[in-house]
Amino acid sequence: MKQSLLLERYPIYTLEIDRSETELQSVDAICAHLRERIEAHRCARFIADFDHLAHTRSLPEGLVGDDILAARNLVFSFGITLPEPRVLALRPRSIGVAETPRGFLVTFLEAPMPIANAAMEDWAMSLRRSASAPV
């Protein structure tokens, strides 16, 4: 898992997975696995599965990179605390799953909550192991 700044301002986590590194061979399978992890977490709540590629292609001005074969976002929230209304600007969370000719790219924006980052990193890393049991 790699941490970096996207567009010099957004701290993101990125995991590149070659097809040979995972049992899960489609974005559908990866999203299903991640959704199971989200739903098994004691504090997380699944919200939506958004097909970003279909949406972008449906727009007259939509532009999609040549190497993007599929692109989805799983939207969810941890919502452990709600100390004040402005916190809503930081929520919900999202994990992006893209398919490329080489394999898959899993990305998420760093959360201001260590428990959320640890869970999302674990979920992403679980794609490289057997998808049998939620952590």
Image: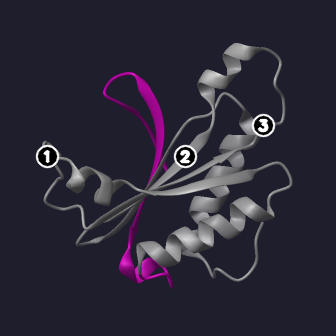
Part of the protein shown in magenta: 1-25
* Picture mark count: 3
User: 53 left or right of 113?
Assistant: left
Location of residue 86 (image quadrant): top right
Q: Which mark is residue 119?
A: none
Mark sitting earlier along the chain (3/2): 3
> Which x, y percent locates residue 73?
47, 54
Instruction: Check contact, mark 3 vs mark 2: CB within 8 A.
Output: no
Instruction: State the separation of the CA atoms marked 3 and 2.
Output: 13 Å
Identify whether 102 is placed above or below 92: below
Q: Residue at x 71, y 42 (%)?
A: 116
Tell me if mark 1 has few (under 14), some (14-19) or many (20+) residues whose alpha carbon lies within 10 angstroms of its own: few
Instruction: Check contact, mark 1 vs mark 2: CB within 8 A.
Output: no
SS at circle 1 = loop
**Camera-side mark, 3 or 1:** 1
> Which x, y percent locates residue 94?
55, 46
Which residue is label 2 attached to?
94
Q: Residue at x 80, y 58 (%)?
A: 41
Q: Residue at x 64, y 61 (%)?
A: 123
Which residue is label 1 attached to?
60
Identify whether 133 is placed above or below 125: below
Which residue is label 3 attached to?
79
> In which quadrant is the C terminus drawn?
bottom right
**Circle 3: residue type:** Gly
